[in-house]
């Protein structure tokens, strides 16, 4: 029986902070900064779904073919040297951020066989002294015994604005209404799927980043983590700690 299902099990020796949320909610930025402040490892689980879609398209596998895509996911020749994202030794960090790959990742992520194929790979990131991970099901499926679970969110309009600004800053073409429409499509697919759908979990896990600076959000996550660790040490039930931050 896993620690997640055994109330009496000792907490896992390696703490996990799970940050879930919808697309463009700032999870990646926040999770990376929290990881670096704590000296923890970092897992961008969405990158694994993006890499799977990218590798499947390259191999000519239909994204709607669960068995075919799951085989690709199981054999992904991926490495993350110094935070870079490499597939078969080639840096694909930018190539997996395009809009077609974003939509493709959302399609392959709806296949249970693909999620199963990526589960062990994600759990292998849990190494001392700790892990901060971001995605859609970090707290619900991959690390249900995470010491802290955060659901980071903001309105669709704000998230679209942020994505638009990012693209413009990179000198890439950007169309705000199209971004908003694509973001809503992905939100609907990621929340509506049958397996491991995006969900907020406990109300106290929600952190609405509307109108907050990155540093404020990082500080809030660190405060919640401190409370969760103290709760755990004093034997109270852990999970999402701290009060909901108002935007
Ligand atoms: O976080 P992201 O935008 O890079 O994720 C890309 C897609 O992968 C997203 O549409 C949903 C999916 N995903 C998922 O289903 N579960 C995760 N833990 C992470 C991402």
Image (cartoon, helix red, strand yellow):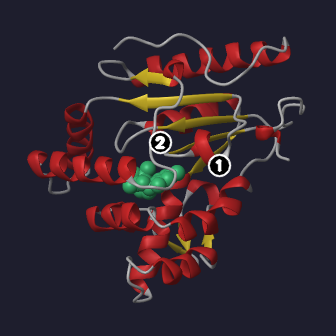
**Rendered residue at 46%/21% (across/down):** 217
State the residue in front, 19 or 218.
19
Quadrant (top left/top right/bottom left/bottom right) for the C terminus: top left
Residue 156: tell me if it is visible: yes
**The quarter of the displayed image where residue 117 is located:** bottom right
State the residue in front, 178 or 202.
202
Q: Residues within 10 Å of mark 1 (few under 14, many from 20)?
A: many
Some atom of ligand 1 lies within 8 Å of the CB belonging to the residue at label 2: yes
Q: Which residue is mark 2?
A: 28
State the residue in front, 163 or 210.
210
Question: Which of disc 2 and disc 1 is earlier in sequence?
Answer: 2
The secondary structure type at the circle numbered 2 is helix
Residue 5 appears left or right of 142: right
Relative height, residue 100 to residue 152 (above, below): below
State the residue in front, 194 or 80.
194
Please identify the residue farthest to the front as the structure is shown: 194
Circle 1 or circle 2, nearest the eye: 1
**Rendered residue at 38%/30% (across/down):** 153
Q: Position of residue 82 (x, y in %)?
A: 62, 55
Q: Position of residue 204 (x, y in %)?
A: 52, 18
Residue 88: tell me if it is visible: no
Q: Position of residue 61 (x, y in %)?
A: 42, 86
**The quarter of the displayed image where residue 223 is located:** top right
- The dot on residue 130 is none
Query: Mark 1 to mark 2: distance in Å?
Result: 17 Å
Residue 94 appears left or right of 131: left
Relative height, residue 119 to residue 170 (above, below): below
Q: Which residue is mark 1?
A: 142
Some atom of ligand 1 lies within 8 Å of the CB belonging to the residue at label 1: yes
Q: Residues within 10 Å of mark 2 (few under 14, many from 20)?
A: many
**Rendered residue at 79%/47% (across/down):** 127
Relative height, residue 114 to residue 215 (above, below): below
């Amino acid at each position: 029986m896993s620690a997640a299902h055994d109330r009496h099990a000792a907490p896992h020796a390696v703490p996990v902070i799970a940050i879930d949320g919808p697309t463009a909610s700032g999870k990646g930025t926040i999770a990376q900064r929290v990881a670096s402040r704590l000296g923890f490892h970092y897992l961008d689980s969405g990158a694994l779904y993006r890499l799977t879609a990218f590798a499947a398209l390259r191999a000519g596998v239909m994204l709607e073919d669960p068995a075919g895509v799951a085989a690709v996911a199981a054999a992904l020749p991926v490495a993350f040297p110094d935070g870079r994202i490499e597939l078969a030794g080639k840096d694909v960090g930018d190539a997996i951020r395009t809009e077609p790959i974003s939509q493709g990742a959302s399609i392959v992520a709806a296949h249970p066989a693909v999620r199963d194929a990526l589960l062990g790979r994600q759990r292998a990131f849990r190494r001392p002294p700790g892990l901060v991970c971001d995605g859609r099901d970090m707290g619900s499926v991959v690390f249900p015994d995470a010491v802290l679970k955060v659901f980071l969110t903001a309105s669709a309009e704000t998230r679209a604005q942020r994505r638009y600004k990012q693209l413009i800053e990179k000198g890439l073409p950007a169309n705000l209404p199209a971004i908003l429409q694509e973001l809503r499509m992905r939100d609907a697919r990621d929340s509506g799927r049958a397996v491991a759908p995006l969900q907020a979990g406990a109300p106290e896990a929600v952190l609405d980043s509307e109108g907050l600076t990155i540093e404020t959000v990082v500080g809030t996550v660190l405060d919640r983590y401190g409370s969760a660790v103290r709760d755990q040490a004093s034997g109270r039930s852990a999970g999402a700690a701290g009060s909901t931050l108002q935007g």
